[in-house]
Image (tube, rainbow, N blue to C red):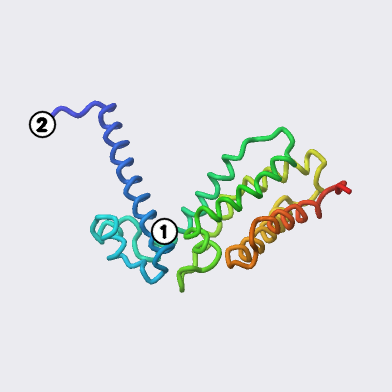
Amino acid sequence: MGTPAPLGLQGAYARGHRSNYDELRTRLLDVANDLLTKAGPESLTVRRIAAEAGCSTQVIYTMFGSKEGLAEALYLEGFERFRRRLEAVPHRSDPLEHLSLLGPAYREAALAEPGYYSLMFERAIPGFVPSERARTLARAALNIVDRVIADCISAGHLVPTQPRKIADALWAAAQGALSLERAGHLPDGKTYEIVTEAAIRAFRTHPPA
């Protein structure tokens, strides 16, 4: 009977195994996102994704369970990427200033990740409906907006109400402008800036003149 490996070595092996898994998962999602962006939803077959990623179809089924599972993983990955971009916005001592910077960061995320954005908000994959769990996790990924809004309320900048109410109004304004811009109806981000600022101003305790 062999001597058990030291715990440190076992831990290193486990971390290496997990790292390889995460790298492969990221590569598969990147390949699927690239196909969705460049070739459309009809290109998202398990066979084609496997061929592009250089792995077997069984790997995809093992990792995601099904094509629908892969679509849901893409959906959640999109929201996670948005979360990272919003979290990367430098903190400001004035929460209202911080909130004003989250809007441009959200737009930049949408324009930088068109494949993910189309899946998250434009039903890019016909028939795909995210599960209730996925919807809950997706909304939670944007909780930084709720937290900063709560700070604005505490500081007296915004009217006392549920932060989610203000966040949803801001989200709706941002999504409307983004949809028009992505469809080519708006030439730049000026309208996006106007409507998001207006959404915030509607909840100000003392709106600027």
Residue situated furthest left in the rendering:
1
Going by the picture, which residue comes out furthest to the bottom?
127
Would you name the residue on which mark 2 appears? 1
Q: Quadrant of residue 110?
A: bottom right
User: Which residue is pictured at 34% across the width and 54% down the height?
Assistant: 28
Q: In the rendered structure, which disc, 1 or 2, sits on the residue that comes first in sequence? A: 2
Q: Quadrant of residue 111?
A: bottom right
Q: Is 132 positioned to the left or the right of 5 in the image?
A: right
Q: For the image shown, how many numbered marks are present on the structure? A: 2
Residue 119 in the image: x percent, y percent? 49, 63
| Residue 204 drawn at (x, y percent) | 82, 49
Local SS, label 2? loop
Judged by depth in the image, the label closer to the viewer, 1 or 2, is: 1
Residue type (three-letter) at the residue carrying disc 2: Met
In the rendered structure, the answer to whether residue 160 lies left or right of residue 129 reads: right
**Which numbered marker is on residue 33?**
1
Residue depicted at x 39% and y 67% = 39
- In the rendered image of this protein, does residue 189 appear above or below residue 9? below
Tell me whether circle 1 and circle 2 mark residues in contact (CB < 8 Å).
Answer: no
- Residue 85 lies, with reference to residue 9, above or below; the image says below
Please indicate whether residue 140 sits to the left or right of residue 48 in the image: right
Element type at marker 1?
helix
Vertical side of 122 occupied by 30: above or below = above
Q: Is residue 164 above or below residue 127?
A: above
> What residue appears at the point 64 percent right and 61 percent down from the top-left corner?
187
Q: Residue 29: image x %, image y %?
A: 38, 55
Instruction: Estimate how packed mark 2 is, as few (under 14), some (14 to 19) or many (20 or more) residues with alpha carbons within 10 Å.
Output: few
**Along the viewing direction, whichever of 84 and 135 lies nearer the viewer:** 84
Q: Nearer the viewer, residue 144 or 188?
A: 188
| Crowd around label 1: few <14 · some 14–19 · many ≥20 (10 Å) | many
- Amino acid carrying mark 1 in the image: Asn
The spot of residue 64 in percent (x, y) is: 35, 58
